[in-house]
Amino acid sequence: AGDMAEGMATALQGGGVSEVLVANRTWRKARALADRVGGQAVRLSDLPLAMVEIDLLLTSTGATVPVVEHDDFASVTAERAGRPLLIVDIAVPRDVDPTVGELDGVTLLDINDLRRFAQAGVERRSHELAAVEAIIDEELGRFRSAASARGAAPLVASLRSWADDVRAAEVARHAARLEGLDERQREAVEALTRGLVAKLLHQPTVTLKDTAGSATGERLADATRQLFDLDDPR
C-alpha cells in the first residue's frame, strides 16, 4: 500500500472504523503497516476469507494487472448473503476489475471518483491555483511565528470551510451511487473525502500561516480570497 492508502487507513480509524485489516504480498510489510495504522495484518492468501466479513475494501498495490477479478469475487459476494460492500480502488492502474462493481451489493469507487468528490471546483480554477502554489513554493519557510499564524487563522478557517462545502456538495451530488451503502460505509466515504481535502489544503494552509504579516503574505491572502471568493475576515 502507498502513502495515500496509509493516510486513508489512518483517516478511517479516526472516523470511527472499529477494525482495519492490512494485507500485502510481503508479510513483513503488512505487519509494519498494520502497526502504523492500528490495524491487524492478514496474509494475502487469506484475503478472500476476510472479504466475506468486511464492509469496506481499500486497495492500493503496484500490480500491473487487476488483483481482484470478477469471477473470484463472485463467490465472495454469494457468501456475504447480500450485505453491501464498498470497494475503494485507489491504485493506478486499477487493482479491481471494473465489472466487480456490477455485482449485487457491491459499490466500486476508483481514484477518479474520489478526486471528483474532493476536487470539484478546485479543478475549475486549476490555472489560478497553480499560480498560487508557485508563490507558496517561493515563500515557504519565511516569517514563521506564532503571531503570524494567529493572524492567518480567520482566512484559513474560511478556506477550509469553503473546501468542505465543495466536498459535501459533491458527495451529495453523487448520492445515488451510494444508495446501497449502510451507515458505517457512508461514514467511511465521508472520512475518505475529508482526508483528501485535508491533504490538498495542508501546504497552502502552512504557507498562509508562515507568510502572514509580510507583503508576500498579504498578496497570497488577497489572491486566495479572490480565487475562492472568500469573505475578507479582517
Image (cartoon, rainbow, N blue to C red):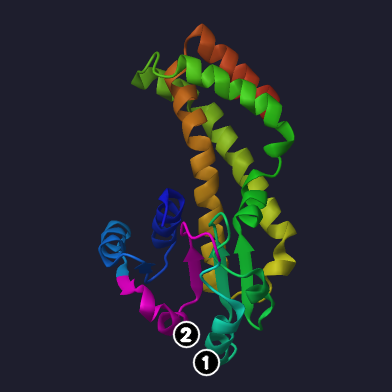
Residue 214 visible in the picture: yes
Q: Which residues are magenta?
A: 41-65
Q: Is residue 117 magenta?
A: no
Three-letter code, disc 2: Val
Percent across and percent down for residue 181 are: 61, 74
Q: Nearer the viewer, residue 167 or 150?
A: 167
Q: Nearer the viewer, residue 86 or 221?
A: 86
Q: Residue furthest front?
A: 64
Three-letter code, disc 1: Glu
Question: Dot 2: few (<14), some (14–19), or many (≥20) neighbours within 10 Å?
Answer: some
Asked whether, in this view, residue 20 is left or right of residue 67, the answer is left
Asked whether, in this view, residue 169 is left or right of residue 188, the answer is right
Residue 234 visible in the picture: no
Q: Against 207, is 164 above or below?
A: below
Among the two numbered marks 1 and 2 on one chain, the one whose residue lies closer to the N terminus: 2
Q: Which residue is mark 2?
A: 52
Q: Which residue is mark 1?
A: 79
Q: Dots 1 and 2: beta carbons under 8 Å? A: yes
Percent across and percent down for residue 114 are: 61, 54
Q: Quadrant of the N terminus?
A: bottom left
